[in-house]
Image (tube, grey):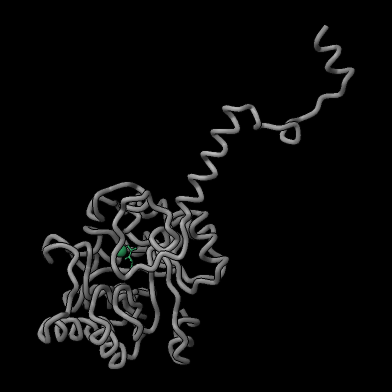
Amino acid sequence: MGVMRSMYKKNVPITVMTAHDFPSAHVADAAGIDVILVGDSLAMVALGMQDTSEVTVDDMLLHCKSVARATKAAFTVGDLPMGSYEISPEQALATAIRFVKEGRVQGVKLEGGKELAPTIKKITQAGIPVLAHVGLTPQRQNALGGFRVQGKTSESAMAILEDAFAVQEAGCFGMVVEAVPAEVASIITQKLSVPTIGIGAGNGCSGQVLVQVDMSGYFPPGRTIPKFVKQYGNVWAESLRAIESYRDEVKSRQYPASEHTYPIPKEELGAFMR
Ligand code: KIV
Ligand code: NA
């Protein structure tokens, strides 16, 4: 967290990436990502659920633990899932404590603006760093009418700014700003004194976050990825290629070759065959 603070002060962009298990966290950490987020996008990308509303605290904790075991340098943050923090600041703190004690992450993220200020205050006062999340908040997709860009009118842009100020005032160490016009996210960033982490929010934020499977291309063909995602790889295609080669080599008895087998001394084999 101190590292984030100093990057922010020096105007060095902060890199954030999701991970959902040991290998995905290991590779992000090895690549020098600053913050690894166990996002509740876990629901879709790792568990095959329709949306994030289905994922439970126990699901999240299992994956947080796996990520934490692989992470050496990055700061780790876990997403509080829908239903685990909205009821009261006390409920939220109890969940956040489980994320730290059982999930072994260092901070938590929750979605929402000024209505969550008392909750953010409660958690941060207990010594658990909170990353807020404003703009498009996917856990509320049913109320927002789907995955829509937020802040496209002066009024709604003002509402996001007010949310941003409120969560900053409540003590969050930074906030994700999702699906907001670039100019709006930039202006909000300039007005704040904590970092913004943009996703679909242009180049004027203090840092960026992407869902790892989206940016690395580790999803089946046909999945529509949002406009803001840049796909830097095609891990699914590489994985398919490898698995098809294995299938072919097993079918043609090319695999396993002699170098993949264990020897037995000749006399032992002779005795065995007698
Ligand atoms: O769940 C998630 O992966 C997230 C990021 C996209 C910010 O919340
Ligand atoms: Na999330």
Quarter of the rendered image showing ligand 1: bottom left
Q: Nearer the viewer, residue 118 or 61?
A: 61
Left or right relative to 135: residue 250: right
Q: Position of residue 54 (x, y in %)?
A: 24, 50
Name the residue at 26% across, 55% down: 52
Q: Which quadrant, please, contains the C terminus?
A: top right
The image quadrant that residue 161 belongs to is bottom left
The image quadrant that residue 82 belongs to is bottom left
Number of labels in the image equals 0
Above-or-below relation of 222 to 252: below
Name the residue at 43% across, 87% down: 8
Q: Nearer the viewer, residue 198 or 239?
A: 239
Q: Position of residue 238 (x, y in %)?
A: 51, 50
Q: Position of residue 62 (x, y in %)?
A: 41, 51
Q: Residue furthest right?
A: 267
Q: Is residue 261 visible?
A: yes
Q: Position of residue 85 (x, y in %)?
A: 24, 63
